[in-house]
Image (spheres, helix red, strand yellow):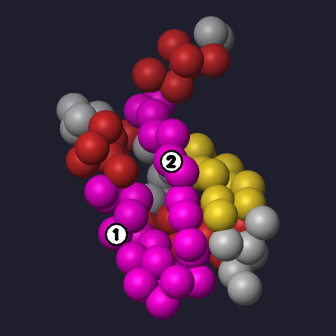
Amino acid sequence: MISPQQVESMIQTKFPDAEVQVTGDGEHFEAIIVSGEFDGKPKVRQHQMVYAAVQEAMASEAIHALSLKTYTPKTYQLAVGS
């Protein structure tokens, strides 16, 4: 079983500038990632970038499901209303 902190670490390694929050039960996870690397990229591409960071864990089925919410710093500020 894999922990939310391990998933967070995998994503953080690929996106060192990102704010990453991961919750989950050891198989099913939800991640919120805020990164400048997403600027100018559509949501599908943003999600592909994150899935690439956890590809090995997903291939081995350590991660059964991963729900993503990705934002640029600007879109995150709009989403949270700050």
Disc 2 to disc 1, C-alpha distance: 13 Å
> Considering the numbered disc 1 on the image, is that residue within a helix, a strand or a loop?
helix
The residue lying at 32 percent from left, 47 percent from top is: 46
x, y percentage for residue 39?
A: 29, 35
> Considering the numbered disc 2 on the image, is that residue within a helix, a strand or a loop?
strand
The residue lying at 72 percent from left, 85 percent from top is: 1
- Rendered position, 21 above or below 11: above
Which labelled disc corresponds to residue 12? none
> Magenta span covers which residues?
48-73
Give whichever of 6, 30 is nearer the camera. Answer: 30
Q: Is residue 5 visible?
A: no
The residue lying at 72 percent from left, 67 percent from top is: 4
Left or right, 35 with reference to 9 = left
x, y percentage for residue 76?
A: 52, 25
Which labelled disc corresponds to residue 68? 2
- Rendered position, 14 above or below 48: below
Disc 2 vs disc 1: Cβ atoms closer than 8 Å?
Answer: no
Q: Is residue 32 visible?
A: yes
- Rendered position, 18 above or below 77: below
x, y percentage for residue 6?
A: 67, 75
Query: Of the residues under marks 2 and 1, which one precedes in the sequence?
Result: 1
Q: Is residue 37 magenta?
A: no
The residue lying at 74 percent from left, 60 percent from top is: 24
Kind of residue at disc 1: Ala
Q: Is residue 71 magenta?
A: yes
Left or right, 40 with reference to 5 = left
Give whichever of 59, 42 is nearer the camera. Answer: 59
Residue marked by disc 1:
52
Q: Quadrant of the C terminus?
A: top right
> How many residues crowd around disc 1 within 10 Å: few (fewer than 14), some, or many (20 or more)?
few
> How many residues crowd around disc 2 within 10 Å: few (fewer than 14), some, or many (20 or more)?
some
